[in-house]
Image: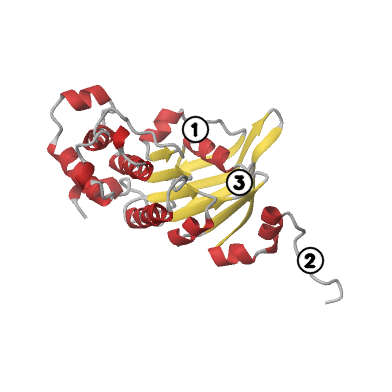
Amino acid sequence: MSEPLRQASSQSPGQPPSQALLRVENLTVSFDGFKAVDGMNLTIQRNQVRVLIGPNGAGKSTLLDAIIGHVRPSGGRVILKGEDVTHLPEHKIVRKGICRKFQAPGVLEGLTVWENLAVAARSSREWWSSLTHRTPADVRELVEEVIEMINLQDKRNSLAKVLAHGQKQWLEIGMVVASKADLLLLDEPAAGMSHGEAAQTADLIRRLSDWHSFLVIDHDMGFVAQLEAPITVLHLGRLLMEGTLEEVRRDPQVAAVYLGREAEKPNAGH
């Protein structure tokens, strides 16, 4: 591992090695009395990939919004690296190590692949300054490593707007990595991709988990299977179950939620 990525993945000074990266404790988000998230609990460890699934309206995106401070919880707490960040503004939570990627790529289309990554890697976050001032050696090293990770070496000087959909998704994931975020929130990262592109995306996420943690929302069970990660199932804003993909597939409650049939009940006489 290079020094830039080693620094990006190091724990905060004095942080116990066993401490969870993120803890969501009894989190509730209400909109005009409707509980979009209802007493949710979730733990994510360092270097862990966790998948969040559930039918439409289950509260998945709202949970991500609450974690990153985009919406304000009405109850519960969000603990990041041992610090309560529940009521911090979104930009301060981002600076503490969480970054979110949406389904639609958020790249700067008028810049090249290399420039997008360099902007993301600059701690000043002042994108114009990042382009008009000399890029520090450590940032250049980090950009070169990330560009190889996302397999866009041959596109380094191409404008982002000419990239294929899957390549834009990989570039945005690379930008999140270059920003040195500890936790990456990915909302349907494989949406619109071919099977081959989705497989490459799953492989990229697995490899990047050596340095980062991921919370991934997706509906594509083929893609979810390739992540080889524990799964959290939401329904009506609540935790329905957690387990492996096989455990989730066999669970009668999950079947009832997704297929609209009643969960199997034990025979009263046995």
Quarter residue 107 falls in = top left
From the top left corner, tell me how far across and down residue 161 is, in percent: 31, 33
Task: Of the two numbered discs 2 and 1 on the same chain, state the one appearing first in sequence.
Answer: 1
- Tell me the residue that label 3 is attached to: 40
Quarter in which the N terminus is drawn: bottom left
Amino acid type, callout 1: Gly
Image point (63%, 44%), residue name = 58
Label count reads 3
Counting other residues with Cα less than 10 Å from the Cα at mark 2, is it few (<14), some (14-19), or many (20 or more)?
few
Counting other residues with Cα less than 10 Å from the Cα at mark 3, is it few (<14), some (14-19), or many (20 or more)?
many
Quarter residue 25 falls in = top right
Q: Is residue 140 above or below residue 87?
A: below
Instruction: Tell me the number on the disc at residue 265.
Output: 2
Residue 184 located left or right of residue 70: left
From the top left corner, tell me how far across and down residue 136 is, in percent: 14, 34
Residue 141 located left or right of residue 9: left
Give the alpha-carbon distance from disc 1 to disc 3, as whole Å: 15 Å
Instruction: Tell me the number on the disc at residue 69.
Output: 1
Amino acid type, callout 2: Lys
